[in-house]
Amino acid sequence: MRISQRAARIAPFYVMEMAKAASALAQQARDTDKPMVFLNIGEPDFTAPPLVQQAAVKAINDGRTQYTHALGLDRLRERISDWYTSRFGVQVPAKRIVVTAGASAALQLACLALIEAGDEILMPDPCYPCNRQFVQAADGRAVLLPTDATQRFQLSADQVATHWQAQTRGVLLASPSNPTGTSLAFDELKRIHRFVSGKGGITLVDEIYLGLSYDPDYSQTALAIDDHIISINSFSKYFNMTGWRLGWLVVPDALVPVMERLAQNLFICANSVAQYAALACFEPESLRIYEERRAAFKQRRDHFIPKLHAMGLSVPVMPDGAFYAWADCRAACDKLGLNDSWAFAEYVMQHAHVAITPGRDFGEHAPGDFVRFSTANSLPDLDTAALRLSQLLEAA
């Protein structure tokens, strides 16, 4: 069977490959004194709050399981609009909000609507691997620009200007970012968008971790800049609805009918039960729970990252959002006689029964130097992982 060149260009998602290996090993280790601790997948250990779960059950019992409008339930779009006003002080009209089957569908719709074959999209290295695959699936080309700790692993306006070519179509940024948990300074984002707009390009900003921001200096939505930024968001992270596959994007008015046509043909609509359930995300009781959980994620960050530093796994930039630690593992690799982050992740998985993610997924610039830890786990899990890692490194 002949496989399309488009499919052949899509690289494996190494996060999931490592997860499969860790799950297989966990089956062998489940009856031992060292069950696997999974710090490799970026998924909250909290589930949807009670009101959200109850709303889903009610929707099913009431028979609200049929197709919705391709753009999403009007009430849900209005609730999201109100959230932008109350949380960020930004007016985002409901008519510009498109509810999607997760942030993945939002990115796919945006890329298909805006990218032609051969168009190039500038992205930071490191970055979330699936984002660049959406660019490539639309026959575009993701151009990764190396970043470092001095720029918080985010693109600068100067970089964008230097690397802008005739075939460049725009930028795809993430703030806060996966894998680093760092955000783009708002003034720098404005500079980038001003330059891109001046070139007639597009600014896409992945904001799925925006609700999990911990630093007021990095807690503003890109939508506060102007109406031409395209923002991608999700109910997965802050709203703890990963498997419900529900997200949204905010687009300029002129793009709404384009997104509607694409959504009608590609997805028909987002999951109806998930949409009715998501209405309850914005109830005061649910929002109170989400804020308590945001504080818990911050506590986990503050508790775990110093432990990494103490054992020589330096996190060069303290994450200001999300639930990740992007740790330099070169010193640990030298101590253990290992070549790179992939070998280190495998060694840790085999000998400490701690699953982490090597840097291979996230970029092309020095991918062997870093590993990503998810700090979404409970404090006892994080303590267990830290103890095992420190014992492993001390014994080397």
Image: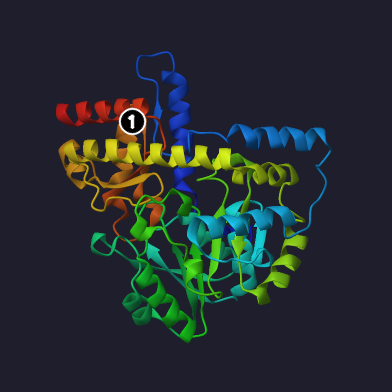
Residue 396 visible here: no
Q: Quadrant of residue 42?
A: top left
**Looking at the image, which is closer to me, 106 or 395?**
106
Q: Position of residue 249 (x, y in %)?
A: 60, 61
In this view of the protein, can residue 195 be seen by the observer? yes
Tell me the kind of residue under disc 1.
Answer: Leu
- Neighbour class for label 1 at 10 Å: few (<14), some, many (≥20)? many
- Residue 208 lies, in percent from the top left, at 50, 54
Which residue is located at x 56 percent, y 74 percent?
227
Q: Report the number of numbered marks.
A: 1
Q: Give the image's coloring scheme.
A: rainbow
Where's the C terminus, which quadrant? top left
- 217 or 1, which is in the foreground? 217
Please state the horizontal and vertical placement of residue 137, each as a whole percent of the image: 59, 63
Residue at position x 51%, y 37% in the image: 289
Q: Nearer the viewer, residue 178 or 228?
A: 228
In the rendered view, does 342 fall on the left or right side of 239? left
Tell me which residue sits at (29%, 51%) in the image.
Answer: 368
Could you tell me which secondary element the residue under label 1 belongs to?
Answer: helix
Left or right: 247 in relation to 168 = right
96 left or right of 316? Answer: right
Q: Position of residue 394 (x, y in %)?
A: 15, 29
Indicate whether 290 appears above or below 386: below
Which residue carries the number 1 mark?
382
Picture quadrant of residue 269: bottom right
Q: In the rendered view, tell whether residue 172 sits above or below residue 40.
A: below
Question: Residue drawn at (67%, 57%), measured in percent from left and top?
Answer: 78
- Relative to residue 294, is residue 393 drawn left or right? left
Task: Examine the rendered structure and indicate whether residue 46 appears above or below residue 225.
Answer: above
